[in-house]
Image (cartoon, helix red, strand yellow):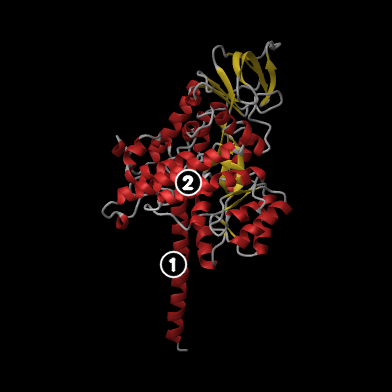
Amino acid sequence: MGKWAKRILLGMLVLTLVSGIGTYVFVKRAVVEMFGGNTQIAEPLPRAADAGPVFITNVHVLAPAADMFLEQQTVGIKDEKITFVGADAPIPKDAQVIDGRGKYLVPGFTDSHVHLWRSENDLLLYVANGVTQIREMHGTERHLRWRSEIEQGRLGPDLFVVAAQLATYDFFEGLWIELTAERNVVRSQNDVQSAVATLKSKRYDAIKASSFLSLPGYQWASEQSEEQQIPLTGHIPLDASLEDLWASDQGEVAHVEEFVKALDREFGGYRHDSTEDFLAFVREKSAEVARRVADRNIAVTSTLSIIQSFSAQQMDLKPTLAGVELEYVNPGLAEGQAMGWLPETNRYRLADQYKTTGWKDRQGAYWAAYAEAQQILFEALRNAGVRMMAGTDANVPVMVPGFSLHGEMQAMQEAGMTTAEVLASATTIPATWMNWKAGQIRTGYAANLVLLRENPLADIAATRSIETVFVNGHVLVRTRLDQLLESVRTANDASRQESLDFIR
Ligand SMILES: [Zn+2]
């Protein structure tokens, strides 16, 4: 080879390397941005000096079964635990006393399906909305770090961290997915075994099956869940049937919608012009599906409202965005291409090529049937006594962290649950599933509590009438909760590249 040929070859090699690194850096920065990592961090409030005991007096207390209020109770709190529940407490002199007359004390709420991504300010949004526990469904090392910071006094909800989903892709797609979506890519039995061992050693609380996990991958994950004693949660993979679910060790299904999708696969894929047949099929199968879920003791997370929002997002996005607390959504997420909320980036927007004559009728019929199928399954699961957990899929449009759980509880009430069942699905049921001594107002349980002005057993909408939140030793009265919200809005506004004026 001539001297010049060698130089040209070397030059090309250097160019390839430089452009490869350049692309990597560029993609990595874009990923950080669109998952909310560049948004200003809201100014945290100084930690309140509330180390001493706190007593809430003369208050209505939600009974452990979440079905009635005990009148005229006193609740004592110290060191992040409930120390007393009863009629007459010996109140120590140094105690802070909160008059609870005419108010309703309930356990702090749990959102069992959230995505924090890189959005740290969400921790404040949860607290400000009385959501004192969350289950992160795409956990990464960031979330493990936030969890331990919260354990050490940082203001935020308790976190149950489900490791980012196990998924199967070929080599190059796998590299891309690991880089952009941070999923745990597994292809062989060995991959699954070592991924689960690593995740467990890092103290993730559970592992998650994705829609894109191969059937063998799902079966290996199930084996490893049992062998390594770590719960398996998440989706029913597209390659798996309900029979595969019954044969698995999966202890929770992350959406009622997963059963709609599984039945749709059995049906052969319904269309806008076969909705009646599909719904008849779902009606015929639903009781048996629910019975099997109950027999296998699988918990199911609701995520009703996000499914109900699909058609509104496709057809009437602006009014839909105007109807949620968009100013609190991390602008990196709202504006970005990954989980976009806004008209140009909305994750559920329909590509123009499908907007041919009659598209609104077709889409409307399709999504109405989808929501109806979900409703049928929700009722069947409830009737079979399945443990239901309230969850929103927060940060997927249009589920605003913290706020959306109250909308979800309302959706569950509208779907036929009693207020007591809804409250249990957001308090005691998820706490029990997550193995937390929380979610009930009992001595020795976590003092994560919410003081309400109105009675949520009369109308679940009362969960929004928040007066004070108690979380991990912090006592946050209404004015402080409003300050938290204000600080997030200010940080978001400073980081926003696109104005929200279009919804006004
Ligand atoms: Zn999700």
Q: Residues within 10 Å of mark 1 (few under 14, many from 20)?
A: few
Image position of 71 with respect to 226: above or below? above
- Horizontal relation, residue 299 to residue 22: left or right: right
Residue hosting label 2: 37
Q: Quadrant of the C terminus?
A: top left
- Label 2 element class: loop
Can residue 499 be seen in this snapshot?
no
Q: Is residue 14 above or below residue 202?
A: below
Q: Residues within 10 Å of mark 2 (few under 14, many from 20)?
A: many
Q: Residue at x 54, y 27 (%)?
A: 419
Residue that sits furthest to the bottom in the current view: 1
Mark closer to the observer (1, 2):
2
100, 34: nearer the viewer: 100
Based on the displayed image, in which of its 4 quarters is residue 171 positioned? bottom right
Q: Residue at x 61, y 39 (%)?
A: 386
Residue visible at 72% across and 49% down? 229
Q: Which residue, given by chain and number where applicable, does mark 1 sit on?
A: 19
In front: 74, or 273?
Answer: 273
Answer with the quarter of the image where residue 85 lies. top right
Work out whether 183 lies above or below 48. Answer: below
Horizontal and vertical percent position of residue 98: 58, 14
Three-letter code, disc 2: Gly
The mark nearer the N terminus, 1 or 2, is 1
- Amino acid type at circle 1 is Ser
- Report the front residue among 470 and 243: 243
Instruction: Give how far across and how far down residue 127 sits, in percent.
Output: 53, 31
Compared across the picture, whether 420 is left or right of 313 comes to: right
Q: Secondary structure at mark 1?
A: helix
Q: Residue 286: percent from the left, percent from the top?
A: 54, 45
Task: State the residue lying farthest toward the left.
Answer: 357
